[in-house]
Image (cartoon, rainbow, N blue to C red):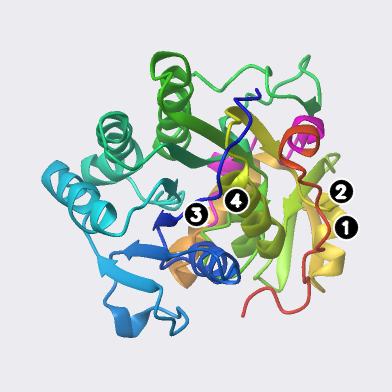
Amino acid sequence: MSGPSGWRAPRGVLVLGASTPLGERLCRALLADPELRAVLAVGKEPRERVRLPEDARLRYQPVDITHARHVHDLLFGPARELGVDVVVDLAMHRANDFGRSVHVQNVESLRWLLSLAERHPTVRRVVFRSYAEVYRVEPGLPSVITEDHPLELSPEAPQWVRDRVEADVLACVKLGLAPGLEIAVLRCAEVLAPHEGSQLHDYLSAPVCLRSAGFDPMLNVLALEDAAEALRLAVYAGGTRGIFNIPGADTLPLSGCIRLAGRLDVPVPGPLLAPAYEARRRLRGGQFSYRINRGRFHLAAVLDGTLALRTLGYAPHDRVVWTNPGR
């Protein structure tokens, strides 16, 4: 996992997905370093809709990364001009988005990014934000998950899982095929925060939470502050490469999540949950789908963060804010 000594701090960082809450938080954390020369923040929204700080070292650029030419022009235009040497990729669609264009942003844009970064004159490091959902959760497998845990490779998995697994595997393969490029893959626990695409956050936004009777699995969730800190540490962990689990500070049963969120916990027969939540989605426009969360709402799955602690110096400190999760 360790690289050569004598590594220097980054001069410029490109953040893809900077218009998300996590992207915004990371940009602020990076700009807290007075030695950092530039942050190139990229999202799809116009600048006036993005809550980024006013800083002479920050440049925001709206880019549609579903086009290979746009990715090329971004890297060999503004990124090269600013001397960007580290790229952080956070640009992943939320769970209920699907279709060809979603797959292109989730997977193909990363493929283009890694291929271009290999021959880029300044980029030397890529930090890819992956997800705990890439791991297989089923009876007989460990409930405490290390980085060598089996991945969810079932063709029956929903697109959001298949895309995340494919992107994760793509980055991991490049680890061995691009020796001149440092790649860090951060498999993050679910970030429980507004507007982060969290299925659990949407689930807890309803006044009544239906839970499968007889099941109360242990969950691990990640605060936005800790997620941003893990990414910041990975940006500065030059000379290191590999796969790192990023757990949160909160590990508790599903019923505990419901209680802390101030919601009513109602156990019901399992077969009723999927149609009930599909009806809720149609009526309220929520994002939560029980079908795509069935596994983790029955079986425990908690990330082991030992490797991230030893290599990146990451340990979760910030607890999730449970009050008023629907806001």
**Horizontal side, residue 276 vs residue 213: left or right:** left
Q: Residue at x 63, y 30 (%)?
A: 5
Numbered tag placed on residue 256 in the rendering: 1
Mark 2–mark 1 CB contact (< 8 Å):
yes
Q: Which residue is mark 4?
A: 231
Q: Earlier in the sequence, mark 4 or mark 3?
A: 4
Q: Which residue is mark 3?
A: 278
Mark 3 to mark 1: distance in Å? 24 Å
In the rendered picture of this protein, how many numbered marks are placed on residues? 4
Q: Amino acid under label 3?
A: Glu
Q: Earlier in the sequence, mark 3 or mark 2?
A: 2
Q: Earlier in the sequence, mark 4 or mark 1?
A: 4
Mark 2 to mark 4: distance in Å? 27 Å
Q: Which residues are magenta?
A: 288-308
Numbered tag placed on residue 21 in the rendering: none
Give how far across and how far down residue 197 sits, in percent: 51, 59
